[in-house]
Amino acid sequence: MPKVFVASDDSDVLASLKFVLGAAGFEVRTYSSGSALVASRSKRDADCFILPHKMRGMDGLELARRLRAAKVTAPIVLMTGFPGVGLEAAANAAGIGRVFLTPHVDEELIRSVTLAIGERRGRSRLRESP
């Protein structure tokens, strides 16, 4: 079962995403802050991360940079309700593969996570080939 790690400072968002993703067949671990996720010893076990763009303390871009600095390679999906000029470029520079506009959560988010995990697994298989 693919593992999706979700960070948010909004407990309602965490509960909602845990329910939606769990119902779709993902194992979901939630973190109430970016620093809690960075400090987690199991962060390398994730198959995908879902991070909010805006969050108290450490925003999603900074959290992604810290995960990449820690050599965490799982794909990252950034959720935002604040699309803006330059966000895609800033996200790519931080190591984020997908930016997802909320509130279109359910099917679109599940599709984004599934695609991100599939792409990562495809790259891993390519590296394993002789």
Image (tube, rainbow, N blue to C red):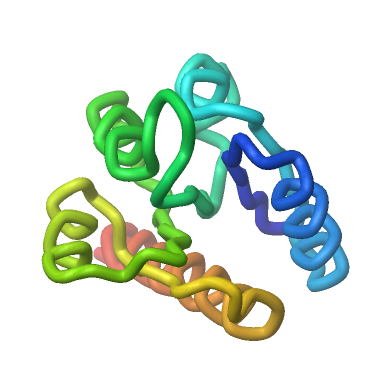
23 relative to 123 in the view: left or right: right
Q: How many marks?
A: 0
Q: Residue at x 64, y 75 (%)?
A: 105
Quadrant of the snapshot with the C terminus: bottom left
Q: Tell me residue 71's x, y (percent).
A: 29, 31
Quadrant of the snapshot with the N terminus: bottom right
Q: Tell me residue 22's x, y (percent).
A: 83, 60
118 relative to 93 in the view: left or right: right
Q: Residue at x 87, y 68 (%)?
A: 23
Front in this rendered view, residue 88 or 129:
88
Q: Residue at x 45, y 69 (%)?
A: 116
5 relative to 83 in the view: left or right: right
72 relative to 12 in the view: left or right: left
Front in this rendered view, residue 49 or 124:
49
Residue 32 falls in which quadrant of the image? top right
Front in this rendered view, residue 41 or 54:
54
| 25 up-or-down from 93: above or below | below
Q: Tell me residue 94's x, y (percent).
A: 20, 46
Q: Residue at x 29, y 56 (%)?
A: 96
Q: Tell me residue 54's x, y (percent).
A: 42, 46
